[in-house]
Amino acid sequence: MTFATLGLIEPLLRALETLGYQTPTPVQAQAIPAVLAGRDLMAAAQTGTGKTAGFAVPLLQLLTMEGPKVAANSARALILCPTRELAEQVHASVAEYAQHLPLTTYAVYGGVSINPQMMKLRKGVDILVATPGRLIDLFRQNALKLNQLQTLVLDEADRMLDLGFSEELANIYRMLPKKRQTLLFSATFSDDIRVLAGQMLNDPLSIEVSPRNVAANTVKQWVVPVDKKRKPELFVHLMRKGRWKQVLVFAKTRNGVDALVDKLQGLGINADGIHGDKPQATRQRALDRFKSSEVQILVATDVAARGLDIEDLPLVVNFDLPIVAEDYIHRIGRTGRAGNTGEAISLVCADEVNMLSAIEMLTRQTLTRKMEPDFEPEHRVPDTDASGQVVKKPKKPKKPKTSGGGGKRNLGKWVDSGEVAPAEPSVKPVRKVPVFNTGPRKKK
Ligand code: AMP
């Protein structure tokens, strides 16, 4: 199959050829004809599968071939993304695909001044890429009207709900014309996403290009058990031993990102960090420098790093496991993209055993454990497997503690707190892992 046999017009074929896309990826092969035929879509596609071109290319064709010229302060198609970085990235791809077409494209997001965005929207844009909050601001300030909207794309819809955007999405839904085409893309499909799809989509075609919730099999994954306090030391050791050149590292909290970056920089290692507290321009600069290999190690929280496309990224390290198991799939999806192979290493301490178990259950695999000599943990990480069982050895009774503060909090079920409390080991020999929290998370 070629892009030409999918019925794409010449200016799009030329752009794809320039980008070196020779054959459509599976999601593109399914999505392109369906979008061209005007269908609504509900697509389960992992990151790195080529989903952006899957929706953007046929959308550009429809906008070129059909519909009126864009009116002032209007958009003909809207692509909603969960994060600013993703909005920038999607917009960059859309602009590349549109390079030979007479269409205008633009991206709007928060964290930067709204005035230039309002100015730019005056003439109207054919395709607008936006994060939900800023879109609503622009709409409320009458800088944007949506009555000309033909197509809505929800990209990484699961992440938008995870980030607590369900209210914004409900508001946006009310702003849209009833008659429109809607394309929903999500790497994972929770029940909440299915409810959203039920509201927003009209007789959608379901596309699933890889088994549900299974991590990319081009990524070699393993776990190194280690004591929590020795993680930074182990990271540096593995980095030197493996001569890591370009690594994306995920830490759980903003403080965790800063602490690791400080430690690495203190050792003369070329590292930078991105998280939600940093200004947008700083985040973008760090990312650009990482992409151009000026920065060797980029440490990020999930919020900042979601959906980023970094070409040929060989390695992702989970310095901490994610609080929400589905984020594991997104994190490791940063490597092994578009058919390349990649590695994902997770440094796991005893406190994280429930998270490890939930990840194994979700991805239906037991992750290989590799002990690193001299880093064997004093606090053993209990055995886990894909069934969700955590096998715990009975604990030796401890001497009662006299101090009041600093006691352990029970993790219970997973919550999105700024920092995660260590799990109190159960005295039962076998314990079923609590169901992880799939509900909407607080906006960060
Ligand atoms: P995405 O899943 O949209 O983030 O795309 C992942 C990566 O695959 C991006 O770097 C795209 O440029 C690239 N890509 C998308 N479609 C193709 C294709 N048909 N052939 C080769 N590379 C592609």
Image (tube, rainbow, N blue to C red):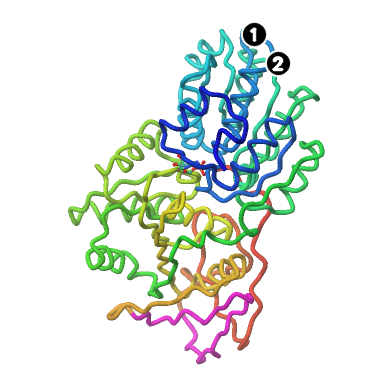
Please determine whether, in this image, residue 109 is positioned above or below residue 371.
Answer: above
Give the side of residue 1 with respect to residue 276, left or right.
right
Q: Is residue 319 visible?
A: no
Tell me which residue sits at (61%, 22%) in the image: 137
Q: Which mark is residue 71?
A: 1
Quadrant placement of the N terminus? top right
Q: What span is in magenta?
A: 376-401
Q: Under tag 2, what secondary structure?
A: loop
| Along the viewing direction, whichever of 328 and 20 lies nearer the viewer | 20
Q: In x, y percent, where is residue 241?
A: 23, 68
Image quarter for residue 6? top right
Image quarter for residue 341? bottom left
Q: Are marks 2 and 1 in contact (CB under 8 Å)?
A: yes
Q: In x, y percent, where is residue 68?
A: 68, 11
| Along the viewing direction, whichever of 87 and 180 lies nearer the viewer | 180
Is residue 393 inside the magenta stretch?
yes
Tell me which residue sits at (57%, 26%) in the image: 134
